[in-house]
Amino acid sequence: MGVFISFEGIDGCGKTTQIKLLRKTLEDRGIKACITKEPGGTEAGKIIRKMLLDSRLFLDSYTQLFLFVADRVQNLNEVIRPALEAGKWVLCDRFVESTLAYQGYGLGIDLGYIDYIHREVIGNTWPNVTFVLDCPVEVAKYRLERRRGESMAQNGISCDRYETKTLEFQEKLRKGYLELVERDPERIIRVDGSKTETEVHALVLRFLEEKKLWPLGI
Ligand code: TMP
């Protein structure tokens, strides 16, 4: 079996950058990593993602929940499980904790219910490690606005359903993520996401080393 790592945090926390850095470090050691993301890691998922992120479309909280779960089931069966069975590392940009944070803490759906659905659909395929990149909402907002400016200039894409939410909503998410870390400290690790990209990457590697997942065979 391979190694399954998920990255979590509020929008603008730097997860996508950290996934790229970890992929590069792994590849430099000759380890091929499978990168995926939720929502949108599969062909069906891309269609689901479009629907979920279109802020012009009204979607009830439960509709959002079930669409995220549907996307996750596709990703698990088409991408994550086959890659793990082939012995690969899987780096997943968001997983179950995003649903607990956004639809649970953010939109108020019962956490026990979200856990219950996931126990059914995930079975044993839980990440070995989940990194929560934690940073103040103002820092994340600043990064997001910079990125948004760049993508608007490149392809006219503006912000999505969740990025347009208030700072208060983002604070709820941040607090939720920190509670999730406390709930399962063996698997879910808080990393200070306000540090530089290189520093955060070093923290990630150090933790993988502590968990004896890294460096491999050296
Ligand atoms: P991304 O921009 O990190 O790809 O994520 C898309 C948005 O979807 C992001 O604002 C977080 C949100 N989201 C949820 O609300 N629930 C979920 O379960 C997932 C996976 C993402």
Image (tube, rainbow, N blue to C red):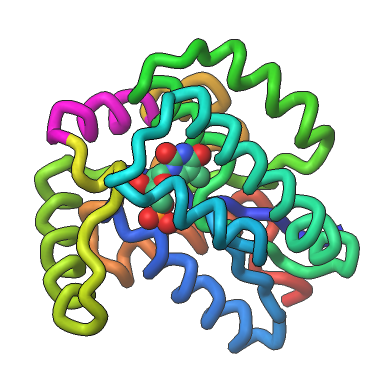
Q: Is residue 172 magenta?
A: yes
Question: Which stretch is magenta?
Answer: 166-177
Q: Is residue 5 above or below residue 104?
A: below
Q: Quadrant of residue 218?
A: bottom right
Give how far across and how far down residue 202 sits, in percent: 41, 65
Dominant secondary structure of the residues highlighted in magenta in the image: helix
Q: Is residue 72 magenta?
A: no
Nearest the eye: 103 or 12: 103
Give how far across and how far down residue 99 sits, in percent: 50, 33
Residue in the image at 43% along x and 24% along y: 61
Nearest the eye: 181 or 172: 172
Residue in the image at 73% along x and 71% along y: 216
Q: Is residue 151 left or right of residue 91?
A: left
Q: Is residue 38 left or right of residue 18?
A: right
On the question of residue 18 being in view, the answer is yes
Q: Is residue 57 above or below residue 33?
A: above
Give how far across and how far down residue 172 sits, in percent: 26, 24
Residue in the image at 21% along x and 63% along y: 158
Residue in the image at 13% along x and 34% along y: 167
Q: Quadrant of residue 138?
A: top left
Q: Is residue 6 above or below residue 196?
A: above
Nearest the eye: 29 or 143: 143
